[in-house]
Every structure is written in C-alpha cells, then in structure tokens.
Image (cartoon, helix red, strand yellow):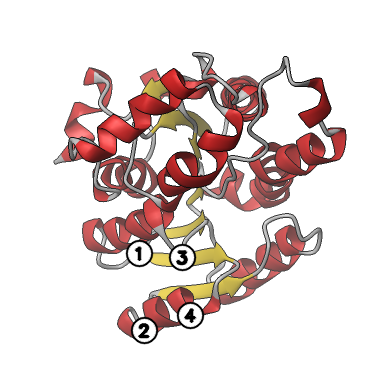
Amino acid sequence: MKVIVVTGASRGIGYATVEECLSLDPESVIYGVARSQEPLAQLEERYSGRFFGVCRDVCDEKLPSELLERVQRDHGRLDAVVANAGVLEPVHQLSDTAAYNVAQWKAHFDVNFFSVVTLVTTLLPLLQQSHGSVVLVSSGASVKSYNGWACYCAAKAALNSFARSLATDIPECRAIAVAPGVVDTQMQVEIRDVAGPRGMAPQALQRFTDLQRNHELLDPRVPGRVYASLATRGIPAALNGQYLRYNDPQLHDLHD
C-alpha cells in the first residue's frame, strides 16, 4: 500500500494525478488537498476508503502539521508527495513598473514555493522512514522566460532548485521536478481570457490562443500519468534531483 499526498487535487492536473494513482495502484491511499469541497467530496464518494479530501488552502500554516498528524495516526506511513497546487498571477510586463506589487509577488511565492517547502519539510520524517518520493510540478517557464510571467518563472525555477537540494540534503528520499507541458486546464483559460490580454504582449499570447484553437493542448491525464507513476513506483535513482519535461525519454516507461 502506498500513501500519497496530492495538492491541488480538485481539478486539472491534480485531479488527474489522483485518479491515475488510484488506477495504477489499487491499494494506494490518497490525501487530496484543495480549496474546493465539492470535487473532493465526489472523489471521496467514488473512491471510498482510498481517497480522503482535505479542504484547506495550501498556505494555511496549520495544514502541514495537522496533515502529518492525521497521516501518521490513520496510516502510519507516507510514501510520496505530489506538489501540484499553484497560481499564475501576477502577470505583467516588467517594464510596466506601475503594475509591480511586491505583496502580489510575495503571495504568489507563498503558494507556488513556500507552501511546498513547508509541506515537504514538515512531512519529511514520514517520507524518510519510507524512503519516499517528492514530486514537484514544475513548468517549462522555470527554464525559459515567458512574456509577462516573471513572477511565475522565478517561483518555478525555485522549485527546480528545491528538488536539487532535497536530493543533496536528504539521502533517504528522492525528489524530482517535472514540467507537464501545455495542458488543457483552468490556468490556460486564465491565460487566454484574463491574465494574457492584460499583462502579455499580443504576439506572446497568440501562441496559447493558437494551441487551444488547434486542439493541441494536452489532456491532464497525460502528465497526470507521469506524476502518478513517479509517486506510486518511486523515482529512479538516476533521476533524483533532476528537472525534466513530462515527455523526456527518461520518463518514457512511466507513460505505460
């Protein structure tokens, strides 16, 4: 039996990862963290006794310790964490100095980076006992600049660095950061309809509009399968600390 924590579990990549975990390992148990109660309740009903919803904000300072206590009490082990929860905003041109708001940048890093660091470090005692896996949902934006996405790019790059540091500092565990590709999620809707028109150059936004128009966005289950495979099977030693794209040849076997 594998016990796994997945954040951002109520939709998109997180939701797909939960379902893929439960499909790949019929005995696995998932704790899904998200702010939306209804999807979590639906998953609990569908996977009774195997999925447990935790309706909380990942930035809630009490969440990590309470989750540690609950997992320890109810299952006595933790095998993997899939850190998926994230936000896109603020999106703006760095040249637009009036749009820069340090509070917004700090709030973004709280969600996309510091909540991950706090959750993982709090859960480390259980992960070390099981020689567990930390799977971080990164982005191509962590290694390539996207117009208007300076904050998002920086936070995702920090996640990649965190994966490397975990691999260096915690020999009992393995960590990896994996970019999911351009996926058909609510974030893509936000890019096309809200954040992009407001904060991106038209030519930069056009790429995302074209991907949607040409039906080239990935189904969330495609990267979800990779994250679920890493969580249920474990991270290969050769990949410990690395940043990879979901379709990297080194991850080929995880798509099966």
Residue 150: x percent and y percent? 64, 22
Three-letter amino acid code at the position of disc 2: Ser
Task: Name which of mark 4 and mark 1 comes first in the sequence.
Answer: 1
Compare residues 208 and 229 and report the one nearer the observer. Answer: 208
Give the CA separation, mark 2 to mark 1: 12 Å
User: Regarding mark 1 in the picture, which secondary structure is present there?
Assistant: loop
Q: Position of residue 59 (x, y in %)?
A: 74, 55
Please identify, in this view, whether the residue under mark 4 or under mark 2 is nearer the observer.
4
Q: Quadrant of the N terminus?
A: bottom left
Q: Are marks 2 and 1 in contact (CB under 8 Å)?
A: no
Q: Residues within 10 Å of mark 3 (few under 14, many from 20)?
A: many
Identify residue for label 3. Answer: 10
Label 4 close to label 3 by CB (< 8 Å): yes
Query: Which residue in the structure is indicated by mark 4?
Result: 38
Amino acid bearing label 1: Ser
Which residue is painted at 37% across and 86% down in the image?
Answer: 45
Q: Nearer the viewer, mark 1 or mark 3?
A: 3
2 or 1: mark nearer the eye: 2
Instruction: Give the residue at the far left of this rendering.
Output: 256
Q: Which residue matches tag 2?
A: 48
Determine the CA span between mark 4 and mark 3. Answer: 8 Å
To which residue does mark 1 refer?
Answer: 28
Q: Secondary structure at mark 4?
A: helix
Residues at marks 1 and 3, CA–CA distance in whole angstroms: 18 Å
Q: Label 3 amino acid?
A: Ser
